[in-house]
Amino acid sequence: MNLLEVRDLNVHYGAIHAIHDVSIDVEAGQIVTLIGANGAGKTTILHTISGLHKATSGSVTLEGHDLIKTEPSKIVTLGMAHVPEGRHVFAHMTVEENLEMGAFIFSKNKSATTESIQDVYNRFPRLKERRRQLAGTLSGGEQQMLAVGRALMAKPKLLLMDEPSMGLSPILVKEIFKIIEEVHKQGITVLLVEQNAKMALSIADKAYVLETGRIKMSGDAKELMSNDDVRKAYLGV
Ligand code: ATP
């Protein structure tokens, strides 16, 4: 059964028609990736799924709940969290305060927040070591870890991740993809947007290739990895 269904989505920025009739299915337990060049529309799709940008037409449902008509904060309570492009950690707040922000939906329940912070620290011991450090002073890789940890604070079923490898060294890119696989192994479904098609296809079950706001190809990630068009356009082969 699909956890997330996007059907015939169209999105505009004023007169610019950015997304054309896009449909995406994410089954519970999968890693699904959306790959495409700069400006293809990947971030716009994630923002629309999260309720941060309004669709012109089409539908987005999470376990049958209509997300198009739902406020972003309510969407988090339905079980979806978003790790934004560029991480957007709160630079002048400590690591722990950033994590607390991710649990704002449980703000009336202190013990749930404390428990979630412990879970994140168990998963990312480096964040525990740096709990009192200002987030803006962390390395890029640590900030990405914090952005993932903050999203996990809401205990999502589905994690949307926007370009987690952006701006990271090859070693840190490997580390971040390992983290995504670990999070997934613990039962969280992932919709991953990436320009690093090679890494994304290597961990995904299913993939969609986006070009100028349209889905050009979709299918089994490993099959797409050996598709000649994908290899030429996205894998530099
Ligand atoms: P990137 O990898 O660079 O983030 P992307 O695939 O995520 O690219 P989007 O950022 O979703 O692509 O952009 C899709 C299209 O919409 C582009 O043509 C972009 O110029 C346009 N666009 C994005 N944001 C806006 C905006 N706020 N106003 C006008 N046009 C926008």
Image (tube, helix red, strand yellow):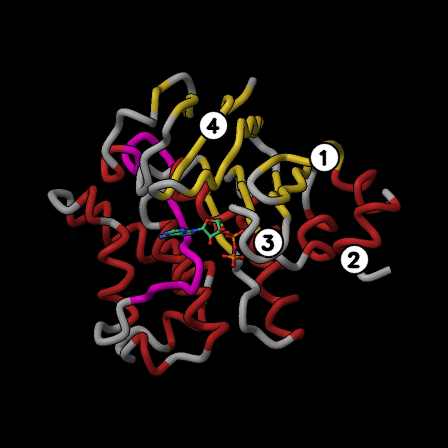
* Residue pictured at 39% horizontal, 70% vertical: 127
Q: Amino acid at mark 1?
A: Met
Magenta residues, as a range?
75-89
Residue, disc 1: 217
- Tell me if 109 is positioned left or right of 79 in this view: left
Residue, disc 2: 235
Residue, disc 4: 9
* Residue pictured at 56% horizontal, 26% vertical: 23
What is the x, y in percent for residue 185?
Answer: 59, 44
Q: CA distance from mark 4 to mark 2?
A: 27 Å
Q: Quadrant of the C terminus?
A: bottom right
Name the secondary structure under disc 2.
loop
Residue, disc 3: 194
109 lies above or below 173: above
Name the secondary structure under disc 1.
strand
Cβ at disc 2 under 8 Å from ligand 1: no
* Residue pictured at 24% horizontal, 54% vertical: 114
